[in-house]
Amino acid sequence: MLRAVVDGMSEGLWITDPDGRVIQYNNALKEMLYTAGTELVGKTPLQVLRSQELASAVLRACREGQTTKLELNIEGVRPRTLNVQVTPLGRDLLGSAAVFQDVTELQRLEKVRKDFVANVSHELRTPITAIRGYAETLKAGALADQSNAPKMVDIIHRQSERLSELVEDLLELSRIDAKQIQLSKVPIDLAEAAQRSSEAVRPKAEGKNIAIEIKVPDDLTAIADARALEQVLLNLLDNAVKYTGPGGSVKVTGKRRGNDVEIAVRDTGAGIEPRHLPRVFERFYRVDKGRSRELGGTGLGLSIVKNLVNLMQGEVWVESMPGEGSTFFVELPGELPAK
């Protein structure tokens, strides 16, 4: 029973003799240390992990009865970080026990959280600084300047809109993360959804002389949530128009792929270098930070797209080459799952 309990632990565990050599260990430890085919019994900490710090901690526990807590970084194909507590066995038993806890994922999530907070703070600071600066200038007397005052008011308005968009995107991501969004799964007419989304960005496209073409078959349907799908298409079309130069074009196509349907948004913009492609759906990741901020992007649109598509049991990916534009693909179920 004791062996079953020990092997059922999620934490790794080993027990050593008074000389610090391993005499027992559990299954979790083998998985943590990638030693499935290696026998650990009889080996020292240095032979198992090549950590002088851990070896010293084991000897202190065996010889001095001292408890030690430490952090180990395991290198390799899949690096891991382990929190280890080494204690003497006690009760007149000679030797030591060490408990290993894998905190790799916790550390990754903590880094994501810190990066997210830092990015949000940075993105909020930019428009707030502009709004405050121009408001103070107007308050100090520039309001009477009929030449420059309207320009300052226009800048304040644009920055407040950007701030509003950022807050809305953050709230949307927060709702997604908290699983507060309940999506329906019903047949959606893709041609109609693409047309509605394109109408929302058409004024911006016309201002840059960009042609938007919808080539989605009238009978093509996807099993999705109407609001979520429209937001996905709107974000992709808005991005396409934003990063396509004057006189360019944006094309939306759709087709069936087995039991699924695929909708693609192609643009004739500058394209994306291959090294950026794996990260374009990350929060706040920008291929060209300066240009993105100049165009008013929040850096959250594509992350929202990916999350919403995943919630609809679909996939999203991008294909692009510098100078050849970009194509964002969304694949969704084309049929309701069999009951």
Image (cartoon, rainbow, N blue to C red):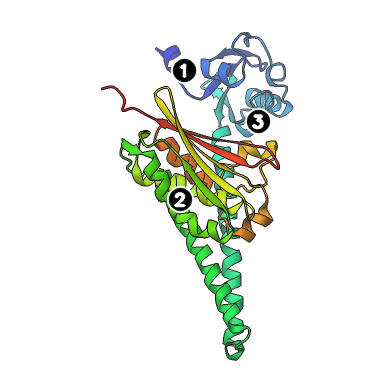
Residue that carries the numbered disc 2 in the rendered image: 198
Q: Is 16 or 108 nearer to us in this picture?
A: 108
Could you give the CA–CA distance between mark 3 and mark 2, rounded to whole angstroms? Answer: 53 Å
Residue density around tag 2, few if under 14, some if 14–19, many if 20 or more, within 10 Å: many
Could you give the CA–CA distance between mark 1 and mark 2, rounded to whole angstroms? Answer: 59 Å
Disc marking residue 6 = 1
Tell me which amino acid carries mark 1: Val
Q: Position of residue 153 (x, y in %)?
A: 55, 78
Q: Is 88 or 2 nearer to us in this picture?
A: 2
Q: Residue at x 54, y 40 (%)?
A: 109
Question: Of discs 1 and 2, which sits in the foreground?
Answer: 2
Q: Quadrant of residue 259?
A: top left
Residue density around tag 1, few if under 14, some if 14–19, many if 20 or more, within 10 Å: some
Residue density around tag 3, few if under 14, some if 14–19, many if 20 or more, within 10 Å: some
Q: Quadrant of residue 325?
A: top right
Q: Position of residue 52 (x, y in %)?
A: 74, 26
Could you give the CA–CA distance between mark 3 and mark 1, rounded to whole angstroms? Answer: 22 Å
Tell me which amino acid carries mark 3: Leu
Disc marking residue 39 = none
Q: Residue at x 63, y 48 (%)?
A: 286
Residue that carries the numbered disc 3 in the rendered image: 72
Q: Is residue 299 visible?
A: no
First in sequence: mark 3 vs mark 2: 3
Query: Quick one: SS at disc 3?
Result: strand
Q: Quadrant of residue 100?
A: top right
